[in-house]
Amino acid sequence: MSRNSTSLKIGLISDTHNVLRPQAAVALAGVDHILHAGDICDGQVLVQLAKIAPVTAVRGNNDRGGWADALRETEMIEFGGIALYMIHDVTELDIDPEAAGVQAVISGHSHRPLIEQRDGVLFVNPGSAGPRRFTLPVSLGFLDIAEGKVSASLQTLKI
């Protein structure tokens, strides 16, 4: 897919729990940046993702050790004039996204893929790309940023 110079495709992944599935790596190929919303569980997952695109990650409740200590619990990041806020567990959201000028909140933790608008803010949970949990899908997501607007999509991985 050809994108113009003002559009960006951001890969969203969460709850890999020590696993970077080959299907996830293929799905993320060609993105401009990857956001990992925590529960990485092994720093090597971030090393592998960084071979695909630059990575920004937040620490999840299962991320422990020296490599995880280097990660923040939240991140504010901007792409193409769009402010994004990352946190592992959205129930611990510590800001008012709308008041802070955030257009999208990226989270993980629940393993449930979700895209919804709340008070003009896009909330996205890409679900879990790691081990399957219960009957939930193995999934990841994408943000498309163009002309000052952001949209999201989810992709279920065939495993």
Image: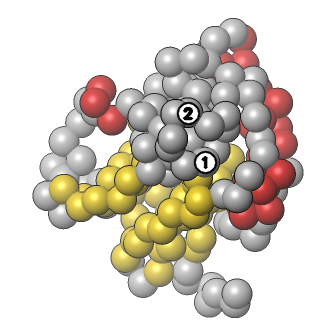
Q: Quadrant of the N terminus?
A: bottom right
The answer to whether residue 6 shows anywhere in this view is: yes
Which image quarter: residue 8? Answer: bottom right
Q: Is residue 10 left or right of residue 54?
A: left
Mark 2 is on which residue type?
Arg
**How was the colour assigned to the protein in this rendering?**
secondary structure
The answer to whether residue 75 shows anywhere in this view is: no
Mark 1 is on which residue type?
Val
Which image quarter: residue 19? Answer: top right
Residue labelled with disc 1: 138
Q: Earlier in the sequence, mark 2 or mark 1?
A: 2
Q: Mark 1, residues whose alpha carbon is within 10 Å: few (<14), some, or many (≥20)?
A: many
Gap between marks 2 and 1 measured at Cα: 8 Å
Q: How many marks?
A: 2
Q: Residue at x 56, y 41 (%)?
A: 128
Is disc 1 placed on a helix, strand or loop?
loop
Residue labelled with disc 2: 133
Which image quarter: residue 133? Answer: top right
